[in-house]
Amino acid sequence: MVGVRLAAGLLIALAVGARAGGWWLLGGAAVAGLLAWCAPETPALRPNPARLAAATRLVSRLALVPLCGSVFAAYLFPRQPLVAAAVVLVITAADAAGLRLARYARAWLLGILLVAGAGFVALCFAIEPAQPVTAPQFTIGGLFAAAAVVFPVLPRGKPPWLAGAVAAVLAVGAGALYQLGPARLALSGVPVRDALAALDGQVLDPLLGGVVVLSTVPAALLALRAGREEPARPRASLACGLVAAAAAAVLDPEQALLLAAAAALTEVLVMAVLSMIGALTARGVITAVLAVTLLAWLPPVYLLGTVAAGAAAVLVTRRPGTPPA
């Protein structure tokens, strides 16, 4: 899931991160990587705290689904938000029917996306940008806001994968910032396409469309599959897909990314607090402080939406000790 989620998220996170921090998008990627590395695993918990942890995991995973759907629609069907909902509904039906991605298929997807990313970075640095590169201006708020929007696309709990993901964000982000500049990148709704246009690479649009499909559709399917582990009943899993489709219909890619960021940061904050019930640890404290700091730079409405979704998710998550649906 790591490669497709990262690719799908970067298709919009580049612009949102540049709007928040300019060149400090790259520093934000490092801060987000630090938080992902520090994030504790789910501890052994009593039934009620365990159910809260399961609810935050469910919301965090499902929040990636409308993000993928809205990015798909933004790149392939501009100004048609209902396409995002239709894509999510199709993916929900495929998941309910038992469609799974085999291990070799995931490996092929990762390889294709790595080649595509390397080609994009090479093109960005091979051609002189139309506007001169400007020196970065440091703002502490921009650094943390950029870290917040990058965090949901990074893996957690696997240091080698995390290091590779952060390196990919730094390379792709540096290429896009070098070619477009922070101002143009921040104003873009489809940053990768606009960067290719700046390179006179419109001929590569069909390839970009393929990358969009190969990243967003599998990422949404895998996120839904991961979310199915939490609900107590199969119907609840289907309902979660329908809610994700509704969210995809009303959220644009930037809004969906901010919601996913709030959900992911809330999840690690809850896990950090629960992990310190038995004993206070430096890792738990660092995770909690960083998560709260990044959450503070997100618009409050997305945190409120995450809390409301988490409260509803508590009602459908399975009790500890019961088998998944």
Image (spheres, rainbow, N blue to C red):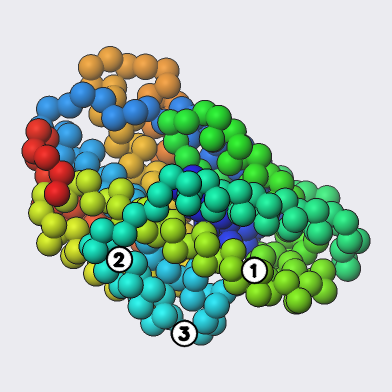
The answer to which of marks 2 and 3 sits earlier in the sequence is 3
Of 106 and 286, which appears nearest the observer? Answer: 106
Left or right for 198, reference 80: right
Which residue, given by chain and number where applicable, does mark 1 sit on?
Answer: 208
Query: In this view of the protein, can residue 126 be seen by the observer?
Result: yes
Neighbour class for label 2 at 10 Å: few (<14), some, many (≥20)? few
CB-based contact (under 8 Å), mark 3 and mark 1: no
Left or right for 276, reference 259: left
The answer to which of marks 3 and 1 sits earlier in the sequence is 3
CB-based contact (under 8 Å), mark 2 and mark 1: no
- Location of residue 194 by image quarter: bottom right
Query: In this view of the protein, can residue 142 be seen by the observer?
Result: no
Q: Nearer the viewer, mark 3 or mark 1?
A: 1
**Mark 2 and mark 1: span between their CA atoms?**
24 Å
Residue at left offset 44%, top offset 36%: 156
Residue at left offset 78%, top offset 72%: 201
Which residue, given by chain and number where applicable, does mark 3 sit on?
Answer: 80
**Mark 3 and mark 1: span between their CA atoms?**
19 Å
The answer to which of marks 2 and 1 sits earlier in the sequence is 2
Residue at left offset 80%, top offset 53%: 122
Left or right for 272, reference 117: left
Which amino acid, mark 3?
Gln
Q: Nearer the viewer, mark 2 or mark 1?
A: 2
Q: Position of residue 213 (x, y in %)?
A: 52, 67
Which amino acid, mark 1?
Leu
- Circle 2 — which element? helix
Whether residue 188 is situated above or below residue 80 in the rendered picture: above
Residue at left offset 91%, top offset 61%: 128
Neighbour class for label 3 at 10 Å: few (<14), some, many (≥20)? few
